[in-house]
Amino acid sequence: LAERAVPAALLHDDLDDTECLRRLVRLAGQSLGVGTRADIADYHRLKAEQVDAVIADSGLVPVTVAGWGRPAWADPAALETVPRGRHRTTLLSPFDSLIWERARTERIFGFTHRLEAYVPRQKRVHGYFAMPVLAGGRLVGRVDPAREGRTLVAKQVTLDGPKAAPAVAQALVEAASWVDCTNVRVERVETPDLREPLARELARLLD
């Protein structure tokens, strides 16, 4: 029953379709921080015309983003937030909202990513379930993970140069802890010259 699942404070709301759309658009903008109409529409799978109908009253503010070439809207709270000096380093699920929309990921990070689970094996480039590595506010590599007993296996690793090795190693060790693994094994590094820097960082972290 609704009264058992919906918080009492919300049960009194009887919203019309326009208000529902307005709230969905505002929530999308707040979640994204900044986005184009297409970005905002994609977040809740709305139609472009639905966004157009309510965005002026959504609380989001129009902004210009260098290099985007199209109008954008931002969450006022995001604009007022002081940029953080430190950033999270982690593996991202291909379904993470930061990267799930490919055009936005390419526009923001200059990073082309595709979930290859549905791609025939012989046509895969980065692996079955390649997970981008987020570090310093950038996407610096990819890892296709698996598990064998208590070992996290990086079946394929792609690094954006030698400076990415510490971040990728850190992300791998953290991911191992998620699945109760105590060891990490790297099978293939796309650029062979980067295997040694990555192995060195992993050994240091796992020691």
Image (tube, grey):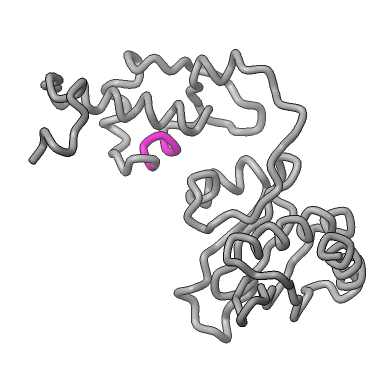
- Residue drawn at (66%, 65%) of the image: 176
Image check: 89 left or right of 59? right
Can residue 18 be seen here? The reply is no
Q: Is residue 140 above or below residue 104?
A: below
Residue 30 locus on image (x, y percent)? 45, 26
Q: For this rendering, which residue is in front, 164 or 51? A: 164
Q: Quadrant of the N terminus?
A: top left
Residue 168 painted magenta: no
Residue 40 painted magenta: yes
Magenta span: chief secondary structure: helix
Magenta span of residues = 38-42
Q: Residue furthest left?
A: 1
Image check: 56 left or right of 112? left
Q: Is residue 50 above or below residue 191?
A: above
Residue 203 locus on image (x, y percent)? 87, 67
- Residue drawn at (39%, 14%) of the image: 59
Q: Is residue 47 above or below residue 151?
A: above
Residue 199 locus on image (x, y percent)? 87, 70
- Residue drawn at (58%, 31%) of the image: 69
Q: For this rendering, which residue is in front, 35 or 176? A: 176
Residue 66 locus on image (x, y percent)? 66, 27
Quadrant of residue 51 within the rendered picture = top left
Q: Quadrant of the C terminus?
A: bottom right
Q: For this rendering, which residue is in front, 61 or 49? A: 61
- Residue drawn at (54%, 63%) of the image: 114
Q: How many marks?
A: 0
Can residue 94 be seen here? The reply is yes
